[in-house]
Image (cartoon, grey):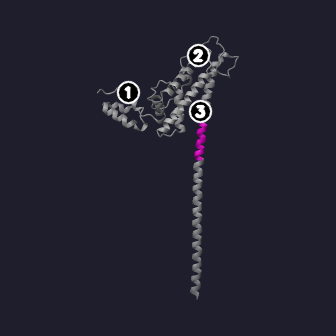
Amino acid sequence: MPMPDIDDQIDRLYQLPLGDFTAARNALAKEAKRPDIRDVEKPNIAAWAVNQLYWHHRADYDRLVKAAERLRGEHRKLLAGKASDIREPEKLHRDAIRAASDRIRAVLEQAGHPASDQTMTAVQETLEALPAAEHVGRLTRPLKPLGFEALAGMSISPSTRPALRVVPRASPRDDEAKPRDARGERERAKQREKEDREKKERQREAERELKAAEAAMLRAEDAVKKAEKTLSDLRADRDRAVSEYQRARLRARE
């Protein structure tokens, strides 16, 4: 019986539970007599979770990619100086990311992996970067959102542009500035999101430090109570010893 295609077998490695990856990869390298297969990299937890979306929940993945491609298409129209209203595509994209993220959270929990804030942040960024040039299904590390870099090579038309309905904050008196304003607003929004994440992480770190300090304080208070009890016991022993000494002296004088 012919051996299945090696690429198909490598694909199957990325569909396995994460803990089974290394043993299965090494077994495949031995069976196929391909030592180079041992170099196939094991994904980290966030990349593995996104791979599972691709392999086992393709409808969610396809919905996300379709929404992302539509949104990028509207941005390309915008940069080419054409009329574009990205509000609906942006909403559909956000909804698709949210649905995919919820699905991945469930996948992690069902597999017994913690859906930590760090992992879900990496998952979120990877979903925002899709579709990507990387082989989704074989990701080994999270991706980073491309933003307007995904539209590299598009030139902004110098011709007179129709009124755009994209960025509410753009000045109606300066249509030439609208694409730049749209890009600036998106970059500012990304910066605000980054700052929000950093702020939340600082808050979580402060909460962890507070809990650690509270635990240390409780331990110290417990130690003080034990020390106070020991001191009280020692004082009682001393008082008894003094009493015995005094009685012994009296008896000695008699």
* Outermost residue to the top: 159
In terms of secondary structure, where does tag 3 sit?
A: helix
Q: Is residue 144 visible?
A: no
Contact (Cβ within 8 Å) of mark 2 with mark 1:
no
Q: From mark 1 to mark 3, how far is it between C-alphas?
A: 38 Å
Identity, as a three-letter code, of the amino acid under mark 3: Lys
Instruction: Tell me if residue 216 comes above or below residue 179 in the rendering.
Output: below
| Closer-to-camera residue (159/93) | 93
Residue on which disc 1 sits: 8
Residue 77: mark in rendering: 2
Identity, as a three-letter code, of the amino acid under mark 1: Asp
Instruction: Categorize mark 2 by other alpha carbons within 10 Å: few (<14), some (14-19), many (20+).
Output: some
Q: From mark 2 to mark 1, how far is it between C-alphas?
A: 38 Å
Identity, as a three-letter code, of the amino acid under mark 2: Lys
* Disc on the earlier residue, 1 or 3: 1
* Disc on the earlier residue, 2 or 1: 1
Residue at 60% of width from left, 38% of height from top? 200
Q: Is residue 207 magenta?
A: yes
